[in-house]
Structure formats: C-alpha cells, structure tokens
Amino acid sequence: MEIAIIPGPIMDRLTSDGGKRVHLNVLLSSLLALAYAWLTGSFAGGAGGVPHICLFRGMLGVPCPGCGVTASLRSALKLDFRAAVRYNPAGLAVLALLLAQVPLRVAALGDGDFGPPAAALSRKMSRQVTRCLLLVWAARLCGGGAGRRSGASLPL
Ligand SMILES: [Zn+2]
C-alpha cells in the first residue's frame, strides 16, 4: 500500500542519497495522492465527478478491492465520513496511511537513523491497510457488510 510513483529520472534530480530516496518518493507520492483526491473532490464535480474505470470489474463483473477508495478519500477530505464509509470503509484506513506517511517520512529524511524503523513501521501499517481492503472486499462479495454498494454505481 505504500506508494512511490515518482519516476527515477525525477528522483535522480531531487536527491543522490540512496538512503533518502525511497522516503522522499513515498512522501511526495502520498502528498500527490492526497492532493489529487482533494482537488478532484473539490473541483471536478465532487466524489462522483471523475469517471470510474475499473478493469477488474469490467472483466469479472465484480468490484475490485480498491473500488470506491478514491471517492472515499475525496469524501473524507471534505469531512463527510458517512459518505466515505459508504463508498469504501477501507478508504479511511488508506487515508490514515497516507497522512501518517507525512510525519514518518519527514522524520526519516531528517534523521537517517530513523529511516529503517520508519520503513518497518510503514510496512506494518501497509499490511493492516491491505487487510482492511481485503476484508471490505470479501464482505462486498458475500453481499453484506459496511460500505456495500451495487457494483454498477460504485465510483472509483
Ligand atoms: Zn475497482
């Protein structure tokens, strides 16, 4: 669940320190994900304003574990937690992970000794978020549980 989407050539320009590279990439990627969710929720017609594309659902006819997470993030960032849970309850765990990356990675960048513990803590949090996503997905596939939505109307 950790995201590190900044391309290598850009990271090369930002730092030559191999120990800081992954922390900076995760920090910037998390901030980009939060900014994307906030901006599309605020300026693109709200949580349902961005077209939903899910290859998994298109091929198999059932939502993927991540269906509704972006809309959940958008709603949560607008402090509409009821809608966030309705879109995908695990979206709140994803939001917590993205927010936690900011102080964690800033601390790791500031103190190299904190790098390995920060990475280990992030991996543990990521595993828990993945478990949340899979539990919500299993509940949806079984036809119950919080955040259940019909597959056809579930935004990304
Ligand atoms: Zn999906």
Image: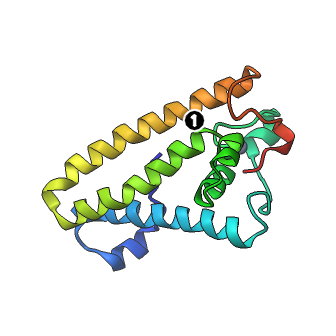
Q: Which residue is mark 1?
A: 133
Query: What residue is shown at x 32% (from left), y 60% (from top)?
Result: 103
Q: Is residue 128 above or below residue 24?
A: above
Looking at this view, is 93 or 67 the one in front?
93
Q: Residue 20: image x %, image y %? A: 25, 64
Q: Is residue 85 visible?
A: yes
Query: What residue is shown at x 38% (from left), y 56% (from top)?
Result: 101
Looking at this view, is 148 or 54 the one in front?
148
Q: Is residue 119 above or below residue 147?
A: below
Side of 50 where 76 appears, left or right: left
Q: Residue 143: image x %, image y %? A: 77, 22
**Which quadrant would residue 24 be assigned to in this image?**
bottom left
> Neighbour class for label 1 at 10 Å: few (<14), some, many (≥20)?
many
Looking at this view, is 89 or 127 the one in front?
89
Determine the residue located farthest toward the right in the rendered image.
152
Q: Is residue 142 above or below residue 18?
A: above
**Which quadrant would residue 124 be assigned to in this image?**
top left
Q: Mark 1 is on which residue type? A: Leu
Q: Residue 128: image x %, image y %? A: 44, 34
Q: Is residue 104 above or below residue 31?
A: above
Looking at this view, is 135 or 82 the one in front?
82
Image quadrant of ligand 1 equals top right
Q: Is residue 22 visible?
A: no
